[in-house]
Amino acid sequence: MTDSSKYYKMEGDKLIRTNRTCPKCGPSVFMADHYDRSSCGRCGYTVFKRKGKSTSTRTRRRSPRKRSKSK
Ligand SMILES: [Zn+2]
């Protein structure tokens, strides 16, 4: 007998999933919940939780072209 009710929480008439499921293994495999990520113990799939700020590391500044007029 598997008690899967602990993965769900009833709030009013809504069923809330308390754990994430692995997109690779299917909805029957739940992912371990960590404070900053959720990882699947079966396939190792890890999804990081989003924080408020999204720090993009793709802000590379293009160095402006300097017109060097050689006299
Ligand atoms: Zn998985």
Image (tube, rainbow, N blue to C red):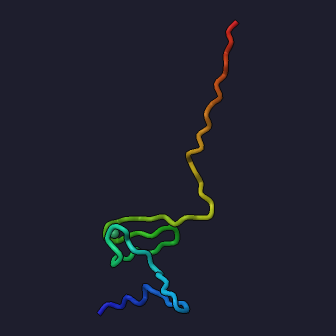
Q: Quadrant of the C terminus?
A: top right
Left or right of 43, for residue 34: right
Quadrant in the rendering for residue 3: bottom left
Residue 25 is situated, as x and y percent measured from the top left of the image, at: 31, 70
- Residue drawn 48% across and 86% down? 15
Residue 65 is situated, as x and y percent measured from the top left of the image, at: 64, 25
Task: Determine whether 29 is above or below 66 in the image.
Answer: below
Q: What count of labels does the image hold?
A: 0
Residue occupying the far left of the picture = 1
Residue 56 is situated, as x and y percent measured from the top left of the image, at: 58, 51
Left or right of 57, for residue 66: right
Quadrant in the rendering for residue 8: bottom left
Quadrant in the rendering for residue 6: bottom left
Residue occupying the far right of the picture = 71
- Residue drawn 38% across and 77% down? 30
- Residue drawn 49% across and 84% down? 16
Q: Ligand 1 shows up in which quadrant of the image? A: bottom left
Q: Quadrant of the N terminus?
A: bottom left
